[in-house]
Every structure is written in structure tokens, then in C-alpha cells.
């Protein structure tokens, strides 16, 4: 039996120099985004008022398979990349499973997550274009933190609309964002027309990513020289995040391993899409057939209980429409602790792959997720983020299946970040005050009935 190290790293020379565009190998492409006014496929001209030009080009490009990573971004990546591929030997022993468990750890930067991979790319293109300032939304705060880091690096002002539930639950995440020089506003707020309308309907709302997106987009399009950037869902974001999977595949090749099962948490799809990218390429091209599993929160189950249809990407209905698995743009999920998994929809790329049967999905309630997080922390010494812990729970369940069958499968999951700013959540779990909220069918139907009718 070959000796497999606990941690496998790539050298700087081995780091990927190109991002991989999964759409170039898809048998059927995701449906195009639609202009919200004309309901026709969104053009470059439609998107330019909101996004930077080079990012628009990446968003609409379905044919270029590989994009060169600019030297400036490569140099920044070297500050915290390559990230390690880790063999979870202690967790395997605790589970008494014959399975081999690996995880790709993306928490080795101040944002504590994978979000910096796309943040630095988007800010680089904004700086190159001469943009005066940027706006964005953030759920749990990882994206807002990552973007504030990137904006500080390139000296670009940033306004972050943070989902109010997370703003109140995670004050220290907010303070990191402020420390890097960005402005943080609890969303929905009275600083935008979109926010005021939402507050008129429900003054006590804890907000959602859809609400925060509406405010950030409005701020961008009404402020001279500003653009909006998004941390998940979009094609361009999954392109940048492919660095995760490309590194992972190279590292696994070094130790002569290939995953039978790949598990990732799923909120908007950025980490999941990045992790699975090269393996999904193998699957699409018929080179291999790994079992790919998305894990989402039971309180916001867009893949497992949503509808595959065109919907607005934001609550205020200002953005283009995307065909995706959605719970309805007006859906406000419970204010649970997995703030990064509280988006009402899912990446059009992930949605299409799921719809066409290339991957599966499960959802878990948060007490079960935190049980898995605590077990993982005990044996692997890393305190995982609540979002990441969904993938841990999925991987553990797959490993326990191997225990029952005796199969020595290789399991890979994405540990998207650390949970050191989620101590309110861990306190709630340890004090046994944490509750589970799962929306009823009737609750979900209310918003599904409001979906735009598009032939």
C-alpha cells in the first residue's frame, strides 16, 4: 500500500495558470440570462451598466475552454495558494470506515474562505478598467470580507450590503470588513429605494441575499463610476473558482488518487462549481464517472425542493432573469446560522448539470450539520464554517455507507472555510438552543406561484 501524506501541496510552479470554463464542454448549455424589461437574451450592452467589461465577456463566453489568469492575479494567489489537499486519517479512524476521505481546505486567508479566489479577479478587472468604486452583497460575511481585502489591495472604495440576520449574528465579521476600509450596511436598509420597499412590506425582516443584491445593484447603477460585483451564482465566478478543482486534481494526481465521490456545500454554487469543475469535465467527456453530490441547507433547499424556471436573481427584481433552481426571488429563508447558503436560487451552470442528471443533491437540517462539524473539529483540529459543515455531513454519510458495504471508496469534499467568526452558532449548538426550521410546501408554493411566466 502506498504511503499517502496527510497534506499534499503543489509548488508555485505547479499552480494552474489558466481558469477552466465548464460551459465549453457541456452537452447542452445553460439557458441565457434575460433582460428583465424585454425578456430577450441579455446582451453585453445590457450588462455593461452593472458589471465590468472583461467580466461581462467572461460571463457570456460559452466556447473559450481556458482563460489565462493574469500575472497580477497569479502573484496575489501566491500569498495564500496553493491550498492544501488533506487526508482525513483521524476522521476515517473515528468513523471506522474503509473509505479514504480527502478535503481541499480553502480557509488559509483572512476571509477564511474560498471567496478570495474570485474577489481578487473581479477587483483586478475593475482596477484595470478605471472603476471608481464597487458595491456588493454578503450573506455570512465571507464574500464581503474577501472583497474588502481585494479592494484594499487595489485601493478601490467598497460598499457592502450585509444580510441583516448575519449582520446581527456575526458582528466581528463586519468589523473585519470595516478594518479593510469598506462600508458595511445591514440589508434591507433605508439607504436605497429597494431596501425601503422591502422594509415597508416587512419592517422586521432579517433580510436575504436577494434583498442585499437589489440594494447593491441599485447603489452601483445610481453612483457615477461604480460597478457591482457578485460572489457566487454567475458564470464568471464559477470560472474563477475553478482554481480550487484544478489544484485539487493536480494534487490528487501526484498521489495517484481519483475520487469516486465528490461532495460540496451549495448555496449559490461558487465553491461547488469550482471544486467539481475538472472532474465534471471528465464526466462530460466520458473519461470517468464520479458521483457528485451537492449539499444544501434544509431551510433554503433550492435544488432539492425548488423549481427549475426563469426567475429574478434579486428580491427587488432589478437584475436579469436566470433559469435556475429557485424558491422564488421573494423567498426569505429562516435566519439560521449558515448565512452563505441562504440564496433563493442556484447557479445556472449547477442547475443545468443537476437538471440533466450529472449530479445529485441532498439537504440537511442545521443541528445535524453542527453535529458533523463538532465531530470533524474534534478529530481534524479545524473548526469549520457552518456552510462547509454541510459538505462534511455529506462526506461522513457517504463514508458510513462504505462502512456498511465494505467498499474502499475515495471521497473528496470541499472545506470551504473556517468557523472562527461563527461562535454564536457554535454556542447555540453547544447550549442546545439551536432549532431547525424547514419551510412547508405551502410556504414554498407562495413564492413559486409568483415566478414570471416565460415560454
Image: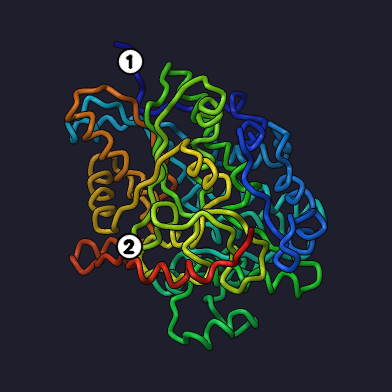
On screen, residue 231 versus residue 405, left or right, reads right
- CA neighbours of label 2 inside 10 A, class few (<14), some (14 to 19), many (20+): some
In the visual, does 399 lie left or right of 18? left
Q: Residue 224, relative to residue 30: is it above or below?
A: below
For residue 391, which quarter of the picture? top left
Which quadrant holds residue 445?
Answer: bottom left
Colour pattern of the rendering:
rainbow
As helix, strand or loop, the secondary structure at mark 1 comes to loop
Numbered circles on residues, count: 2
Q: Position of residue 184 (x, y in %)?
A: 57, 72
Indicate which disc, 1 or 2, sits on the residue closer to the N terminus: 1
Q: Is any part of residue 419 visible from this angle?
A: no
Residue 237 location in percent, x, y? 61, 48
Which residue is painted at 40% across and 41% down in the image?
A: 360
Residue occupying the point 39% across, 56% down = 305
Residue 3 is marked as 1
> Looking at the image, which is closer to me, 337 or 360?
360
Q: Is residue 53 above or below residue 403?
A: below
The quadrant in which the N terminus is found is top left
Residue 224: give x, y in percent of width and height: 81, 72
Label drawn at residue 423: 2
403 horizontally vs 340: left or right: left
User: Mark 2 and mark 1 in contact (Cβ < 8 Å)?
Assistant: no
Front in this rendered view, residue 30 or 16: 30
Q: Is residue 351 visible?
A: yes
Residue furthest toward the front?
Answer: 455
Q: Nearer the viewer, residue 69 or 51?
A: 51
Locate residue 202 relative to residue 235 in the image: left or right.
left
Marks 1/2: CA–CA distance: 37 Å
Mark 2, secondary structure of its residue: helix
On-image quarter of the C terminus? bottom right
Amino acid at each position: 500500500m502506498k504511503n499517502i501524506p496527510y497534506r499534499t501541496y503543489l509548488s508555485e510552479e505547479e499552480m494552474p495558470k489558466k481558469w477552466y470554463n465548464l460551459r465549453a464542454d457541456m452537452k447542452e448549455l445553460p439557458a441565457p440570462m434575460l433582460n428583465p424589461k424585454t425578456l430577450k437574451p441579455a446582451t453585453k450592452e445590457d450588462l455593461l451598466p452593472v458589471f465590468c467589461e472583461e467580466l461581462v465577456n467572461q460571463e457570456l463566453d460559452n466556447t473559450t475552454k481556458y482563460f489565462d489568469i493574469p500575472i497580477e492575479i497569479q502573484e496575489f494567489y501566491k500569498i495564500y495558494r496553493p491550498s492544501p489537499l488533506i487526508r482525513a486519517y483521524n476522521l476515517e479512524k473515528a468513523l471506522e470506515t474503509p473509505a479514504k476521505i480527502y478535503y481541499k481546505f480553502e480557509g488559509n486567508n483572512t476571509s477564511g474562505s474560498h471567496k478570495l479566489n474570485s474577489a481578487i479577479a473581479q477587483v483586478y478587472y475593475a482596477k484595470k478598467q478605471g472603476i471608481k468604486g464597487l458595491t456588493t452583497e454578503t450573506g455570512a460575511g465571507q464574500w464581503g470580507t474577501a472583497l474588502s481585502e481585494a479592494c484594499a489591495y487595489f485601493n478601490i472604495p467598497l460598499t457592502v450590503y450585509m444580510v441583516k440576520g448575519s449582520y446581527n449574528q456575526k458582528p466581528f465579521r463586519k468589523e473585519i470588513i470595516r478594518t479593510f476600509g469598506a462600508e458595511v450596511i445591514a440589508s434591507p436598509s433605508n439607504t436605497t429605494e429597494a431596501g425601503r420597499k422591502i422594509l415597508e412590506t416587512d419592517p422586521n425582516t432579517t433580510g436575504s441575499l436577494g434583498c442585499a443584491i437589489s440594494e447593491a445593484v441599485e447603489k452601483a447603477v445610481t453612483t457615477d463610476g461604480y460597478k457591482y460585483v457578485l460572489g457566487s451564482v454567475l458564470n464568471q465566478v464559477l470560472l474563477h473558482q475553478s482554481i480550487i478543482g484544478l489544484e485539487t486534481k493536480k494534487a490528487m494526481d501526484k498521489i495517484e488518487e481519483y475520487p469516486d465521490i465528490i461532495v460540496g456545500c451549495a448555496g449559490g454554487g461558487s465553491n461547488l462549481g469550482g471544486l467539481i469543475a475538472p472532474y465534471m469535465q471528465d464526466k462530460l467527456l466520458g473519461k470517468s464517472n464520479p458521483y457528485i453530490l451537492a449539499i444544501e441547507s434544509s431551510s433554503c433547499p433550492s435544488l432539492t425542493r425548488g423549481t427549475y424556471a426563469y426567475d429574478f436573481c434579486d428580491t427587488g427584481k432589478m437584475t436579469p432573469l436566470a433559469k435556475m433552481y429557485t424558491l422564488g426571488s421573494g423567498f426569505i429563508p429562516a435566519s439560521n446560522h449558515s448565512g452563505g447558503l441562504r440564496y433563493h436560487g442556484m447557479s445556472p451552470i449547477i442547475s443545468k448539470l443537476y437538471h440533466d442528471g450529472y449530479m445529485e443533491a441532498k439537504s440537511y437540517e442545521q443541528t445535524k450539520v453542527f453535529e458533523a462539524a463538532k465531530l470533524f473539529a474534534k478529530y481534524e483540529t479545524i473548526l469549520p464554517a457552518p456552510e462547509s459543515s454541510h459538505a462534511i455531513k455529506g462526506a461522513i454519510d457517504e463514508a458510513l455507507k462504505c462502512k456498511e458495504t465494505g467498499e474502499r471508496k475515495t471521497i473528496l469534499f470541499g472545506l470551504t472555510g473556517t468557523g472562527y467568526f461563527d461562535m454564536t452558532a457554535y454556542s447555540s449548538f453547544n447550549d442546545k438552543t439551536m432549532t431547525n426550521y424547514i419551510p412547508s410546501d405551502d410556504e414554498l408554493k407562495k413564492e413559486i406561484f409568483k415566478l414570471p411566466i416565460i415560454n
